[in-house]
């Protein structure tokens, strides 16, 4: 996955929540564009409920998909 693809999802208007799946099987839901910071080779994802930050190398992001509306 490249940074530009993730930026495109973050910049959609209206914003559409999505899920990032990693090569190790972990998945992170992005419900607001403000919880992701994109660097050159890494991204940081903040869990707004716990304030935990996860740093992920872009090379380990396998897929991105829209979350289903509840």
Image (cartoon, rainbow, N blue to C red):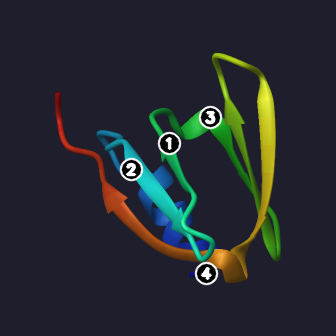
Work out whether 38 lies above or below 35: below
Separation of residues labelled 2 and 3 (CA atoms): 13 Å
Residue situated in front as seen by the camera: 12 or 49: 49
Question: How many residues crowd around disc 4 within 10 Å: few (fewer than 14), some, or many (20 or more)?
Answer: few
Work out whether 64 lies above or below 2: above
Q: Which mark is residue 34?
A: 3
Separation of residues labelled 1 and 3 (CA atoms): 9 Å
Does the residue at mark 1 contact the one at mark 2 (Cβ under 8 Å)?
Answer: yes
Mark 2, mark 3: which one is toward the viewer? 2
Does the residue at mark 1 contact the one at mark 3 (Cβ under 8 Å)?
Answer: no
Mark 2, mark 4: which one is toward the viewer? 2
Point 81% across, 65% down: residue: 39
Q: Secondary structure at mark 1?
A: strand
Separation of residues labelled 1 and 2 (CA atoms): 5 Å
Considering the image in quadrants, where does the C terminus appear?
top left
The x, y position of residue 7, in whole percent, is 55, 62
Please tell me in which quadrant of the rendered image residue 3 appears. Answer: bottom right
Point 49% across, 51% down: residue: 10
Relative to 15, 10 lies left or right: right
Point 65% across, 22% down: residue: 48
Q: Secondary structure at mark 4?
A: loop
Point 43% across, 58% down: residue: 9
Task: Quickly name the residue at label 1.
Answer: 30
Mark 4, mark 1: which one is toward the viewer? 1
Task: Quickly name the residue at label 2.
Answer: 18
Task: Quickly name the residue at label 4.
Answer: 2
Relative to 2, 19 lies left or right: left
Of the residues under marks 3 and 4, which one precedes in the sequence? 4
Relative to 19, 60 lies left or right: right
């Amino acid at each position: 996955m490249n940074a530009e693809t993730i930026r495109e999802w973050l910049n959609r208007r209206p914003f559409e929540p999505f899920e990032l799946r990693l090569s190790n099987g972990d998945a992170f839901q992005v419900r607001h564009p403000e919880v992701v910071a994109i660097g050159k080779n890494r991204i940081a994802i903040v869990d707004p409920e716990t304030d935990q930050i996860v740093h992920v190398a872009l090379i380990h992001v396998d897929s991105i998909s829209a979350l289903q509306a509840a």
